[in-house]
Amino acid sequence: MSDQILSLEKISKKYNQAKTCISLFENFDLSIGSGEFIIITGPSGSGKTTLLNIIGFIDKFDKGRVYLNGEEITGISSEEKNQIRRKYFGFIYQNYNLLDHFNSIENVALPLILNNESLFNAKKKASDMLEILDLKGRELHYPNTLSGGEQQRVAIARALINKPRIILADEPTGNLDKENSKKIFNYLIDYVESEKISLVIATHNNEMKDKSTKKIELTK
Ligand SMILES: Nc1ncnc2c1ncn2[C@@H]1O[C@H](COP(=O)(O)OP(=O)(O)OP(=O)(O)O)[C@@H](O)[C@H]1O
Ligand SMILES: [Mg+2]
């Protein structure tokens, strides 16, 4: 099992809100291998976002174990989680989550700067990545002067810039029309395939299902 990057074993997750207890996962197992494309589907409220957040060390779980490269890391400190998150994961959010006061280059360069890369190198790499995503000429635009599809591509560039091992994408094309959604999905697939990055996507887009290596269907 040497090419397993991350494994979740017997994960349980409940939310207690007011008087109701929502049990989202019970003894849930998932392993993410190198270069895998995992697709998560399920109705609204079934736990897709929560699962992505558990995988990416953003949400905590109640029970279960986590292994990274075959080594158990359940219960590591928040600081260790932050380090792993920065090194291993790229996140693409449904609503882009770009920083409004930063232009495209600055938004994309940010993860590199947080990883102590020089400003000069970070901006050069960000500019190259924007070009790959067909955004040449939009480097100095602020998010509110970009179209939805352009903002989404900036968000994808930001998620890819660190060459993460795993991309976590929450309905990455949810707000786009069919043509743009297809285009963006193809960018993403080509890039992760060429770089052997694993991709975990929560989506309602059935066309994506054909290319996946694993399908997780959550129910309510
Ligand atoms: N912090 C929280 N406290 C209590 N309940 C929560 C919390 N976060 C999420 N939930 C509940 O957990 C369930 C799963 O939420 P989640 O956001 O993971 O669903 P989802 O499958 O991503 O839905 P959607 O397709 O609408 O994005 C929902 O019923 C939600 O109300
Ligand atoms: Mg969601």
Image (cartoon, rainbow, N blue to C red):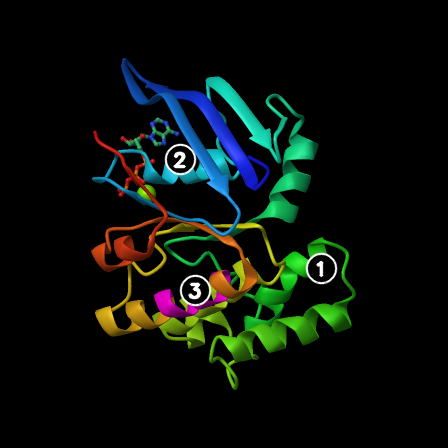
Q: Position of residue 24 (x, y in %)?
A: 32, 25
Q: CA distance from mark 3 to mark 1?
A: 23 Å
Q: Position of residue 199 (x, y in %)?
A: 45, 51
Position of 167 relative to 71 (above/below): below
Residue 187 counted in the magenta span: yes
Q: Is residue 187 visible?
A: yes
Q: Is mark 2 within 8 Å of ligand 1?
A: yes
> Mark 3 highlights which residue?
188
Q: Residues within 10 Å of mark 2 (few under 14, many from 20)?
A: many
Dot 2 lies on which element? helix
Q: Which mark is residue 51?
A: 2
Of labels 3 and 1, earlier in sequence is 1
Of badges 2 and 1, the one in the foreground is: 2
Q: CA distance from mark 2 to mark 1?
A: 28 Å
Callout 3 amino acid: Leu
Q: Residue furthest front?
A: 1
Position of 138 relative to 1 (above/below): below
Q: Residue furthest bottom?
A: 137
Dot 1 lies on which element? helix
Give 219 or 44, whichever is nearer the viewer.
219
Instruction: Look at 40% across and 35% down and name the residue there.
Output: 51
Of labels 2 and 1, earlier in sequence is 2
Of badges 3 and 2, the one in the foreground is: 3
Instruction: Look at 76% across and 73% down and name the residue there.
Output: 120
Looking at the rendering, in which quadrant would you find the C terminus?
A: top left
Q: Which mark is residue 113?
A: 1
Dot 3 lies on which element? helix
Looking at the rendering, in which quadrant would you find the N terminus?
A: top right
- Quadrant in the picture for residue 40: top left
Task: Give the extent of the magenta segment.
Answer: 185-192
Q: Is residue 141 visible?
A: no
